[in-house]
Image (spheres, rainbow, N blue to C red):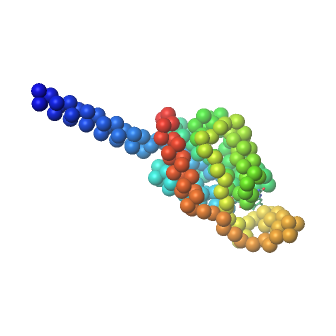
Amino acid sequence: MKFRIVLCVVIVGVCLLSLAKGIEAGNDEKRVAIIYGSRYGSTAQTAEWIAEGMQGVPKVMSAKDVGDLSYYDLIILGSGIYGGQLQEDMRAFLAERKEEVKSKIVALFVVCGSTGPSAERYLDMFAAECGGITPILKRYFGGWLKKELLSPEDYQILENYYKSANQPFENYDETDKTKCVEFGKEIWEAIKNAPQ
Ligand SMILES: Cc1cc2nc3c(=O)[nH]c(=O)nc-3n(C[C@H](O)[C@H](O)[C@H](O)COP(=O)(O)O)c2cc1C
């Protein structure tokens, strides 16, 4: 009788342990890609920090050199904003592969100069351009302006913009690693129960 009780306790213990391990290991087995469109690097940096918040699990790749995506179960897309549009590599990527990826997209982010409702509108536009998806999470982030990196055309556009807005045309860095890592953690939590 005593032996049976001990046996039962051991079996229940082993079951609970493997259940807990299973839950814990769930996300480690997820195959996640973060695909970004970036002209001057701040969206690329943001993508790396989001991946850090997801324990380094996602493969981070530029929209201009995305290969076979069949391996990935879940996809996160991020884009810089230029003239109110998604960055050109992201637009080209979506034009070509939207149908292939839209059911895998779990989160979207944009990196832009705007904040508040304007930035939220970019996120809505992004979701619409992904085929009208509703991502689990979406967020906008600040980027950087490094005048020394700008193409002559972009330099001219921004110089004119800041002049007409009566604002100084100066370098800035509005990136925020903590916020990006936090967003990564939120996605990580949200996808725990997503199907593989
Ligand atoms: C030529 C140019 C046009 C831009 N147009 C917009 C815009 O329409 N709306 C906005 O919010 N930000 C705009 N931005 C700011 C960028 O979205 C921001 O700098 C972003 O961080 C760029 O991402 P990247 O560094 O990954 O290329 C513009 C920046 C440049 C250089």
Residue 182 in the figure: left or right of residue 84: left
Res. 183 visible in picture: yes
**Is residue 98 visible from the viewing direction of this image?**
no
* Residue at screen point 51% across, 41% down: 191
Q: x and y percent of residue 60 in the render?
A: 54, 51
Q: Residue at x 60, y 34 (%)?
A: 103
Q: What percent of the width, then of the height, locates residue 180?
A: 57, 57
127 sits left or right of 71 in the view: right
User: Between residues 178 and 94, which one lies in front from this camera angle?
Assistant: 178
Q: Between residue 85 and residue 10, name the one nearer to us.
A: 10
Give the total number of marks visible in the rendering.
Answer: 0
Residue at horizontal 74%, vertical 58%? 114
Q: Is residue 122 above or below residue 19?
A: below
At 64% from the left and 47% from the top, the residue drawn is 138
Q: Nearer the viewer, residue 46 or 89?
A: 46
In this view, 135 is above or below 183: above
View quadrant of ligand 1: bottom right
Residue 23 falls in image quadrant: top left
Q: Position of residue 187 (x, y in %)?
A: 54, 46
Which picture quadrant has residue 96?
A: top right
Quadrant for the N terminus, please.
Answer: top left
Query: In the image, is residue 133 above or below residue 184?
Result: above
Residue 148: x percent and y percent?
Answer: 71, 71
Please, which residue is most extreme toward the right here? 164
